[in-house]
Amino acid sequence: MEKDMEQYIEKLRRYYDSDNRLTQYPSKKPMRILALIQIALKISPERKYTEKEVNRIIRDSITFSDIELIRREMFQYRLIGRLRDGSEYWSEPDWKTKYEAYL
């Protein structure tokens, strides 16, 4: 698994520009999770965020326009949590344990 992860990390570098922004969303699940983790690391576990703030973090991390896709997948993979009405977001407390192999 570790060797596979190293290969995914190496391949994923091609998806970033010189400003370390994701230029396209990878199709392979392990690479998608790695890309999402890079964004999740920018969300502090110490505070709550509005949807607008989360969107700004995502927008500053990607060069393509599908902010909603990234936000939904971060929620789906439990990197972030949110209130049902979407008014508040946070970093899920246990995601680093769940995705330890990716870190």
Image (cartoon, helix red, strand yellow):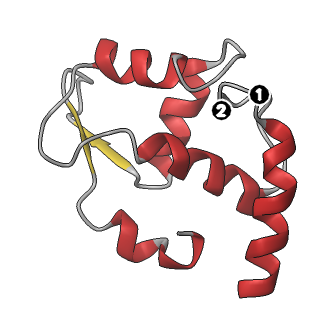
Left or right of 88? Residue 60 is right
Left or right of 52? Residue 99 is right
Left or right of 43? Residue 78 is right
Q: Secondary structure at mark 1?
A: loop
**Residue 17: image tag:** 1
Coordinates of residue 66 in the picture (x, y in percent): 65, 18
In contact (CB < 8 Å): disc 1 and disc 2? yes
For mark 2, does the 10 Å Cα neighbourhood hold few (<14), some (14 to 19), or many (20 or more) residues?
Answer: some
Residue under the image location 70 percent in, 17 percent down:
63
Query: Marks 1/2: CA distance?
Result: 5 Å
Q: Which quadrant is home to the N terminus?
A: bottom right
* Residue 1 appearing in the image: no
Left or right of 70? Residue 71 is left
Establish if 101 lies above or below 95: below
Q: Quadrant of residue 93?
A: bottom left
Coordinates of residue 91 in the picture (x, y in percent): 27, 47
Q: Amino acid at mark 1?
A: Asp
* Residue 77 appearing in the image: yes
**Residue 35: image tag:** none
**Residue 20: image tag:** 2
Q: Secondary structure at mark 2?
A: loop
As rendered, which of 74 and 57 lies closer to the eye?
57
Residue under the image location 20 percent in, 20 percent down:
87
Coordinates of residue 25 in the picture (x, y in percent): 76, 35
Coordinates of residue 58 in the picture (x, y in percent): 49, 25
Q: How many marks?
A: 2
Residue under the image location 57 percent in, 46 percent down:
36
Q: Quadrant of residue 64?
A: top right
Residue under the image location 71 percent in, 86 percent down:
2
Establish if 83 lies above or below 30: above
